[in-house]
Image (cartoon, rainbow, N blue to C red):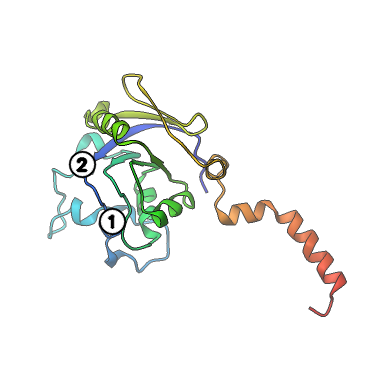
Amino acid sequence: MQKFTKLTAVAAPMPMINIDTDAIIPKQFLKTIKRTGLGQHLFSELRYDEKGNEKPDFVLNKPAYRKAEILVAGDNFGCGSSREHAPWALLDFGIRCVISTDFADIFYNNCFQNGILPIRVSPEDLEKLMDDAQRGSNATLSIDLEAQEIRGPDGGVVKFDMDAYRKHCLVNGLDNIGITMAKGKAIDTYEAKAKSEKPWL
């Protein structure tokens, strides 16, 4: 999994509340088990009309935000079904961080397993960051996970809380499999001992 330490990138404003996982990646695109190729379908029903043409008023279709790597979103982002395809689609599009006042628990957990940093901030701080994100080509935020800071284009700083274990995993690029593999030597030692002591198993 890709490490997350610092990120300076364009932030796209999505002030809508209750953006659910079906809006993030609609159900018709869930047939694949590959983590790649889903970015083109991210927010499909918001990005495209019924003929497949881009809707010019959708934020990620606007020239200033086409390469956004940060989303500043309304409350309760990622609610709905537990589909892991939602963070897969965000990451495949290029989104490495989502900032909101709150997230659905399963989506929040899935983000950490896929190298995406979900940041919870207060409504007051979200309002400031949303204002920063609405500056078009000047909508650049700098995120420092180790310092737990978000710095706006004018130098303003927003602090955020982060669980120490989750932070450790992201900074070191460790998902659940990576954490297990890091204990590989101890696991091998245990298995060898168990095999010698209980060869019938």
- Is residue 38 positioned above or below 123 on the image? below
State the SS at label 1. loop
Which residue is label 1 attached to? 20
Residue 182: % across, % down = 67, 51
Snapshot quadrant of residue 99: top left
Q: Where, quadrant-wise, is the C terminus in this rendering?
A: bottom right
Q: Which kind of residue does numbered mark 2 sit on?
A: Val
From the viewer's perspective, is 175 left or right of 15? right
Residue 113: % across, % down = 49, 52
Residue at point 35%, 19% (across, down) = 155
- Is residue 158 positioned above or below 67 on the image? above
Mark 1 or 2, closer to the camera: 1
The number of numbered discs placed on residues in the rendered structure image is 2
Which residue is label 2 attached to? 59
Crowd class of label 2 (few under 14; some 14 to 19; many from 20; radius 10 Å): some
- Name, please, the residue furthest toward the right: 197
- Is residue 38 positioned above or below 200 on the image? above
- Name, please, the residue furthest toward the bottom: 200
What is the C-alpha distance between the residues marked 1 and 2? 17 Å
From the viewer's perspective, is 168 left or right of 123? right
Residue at point 19%, 57% (across, down) = 45
Residue at point 34%, 36% (across, down) = 122
State the SS at label 2. helix
Q: Which kind of residue does numbered mark 1 sit on?
A: Asp
Residue 37: % across, % down = 36, 56
Reading the chain from its start, which is encountered first: label 1 or label 2? 1
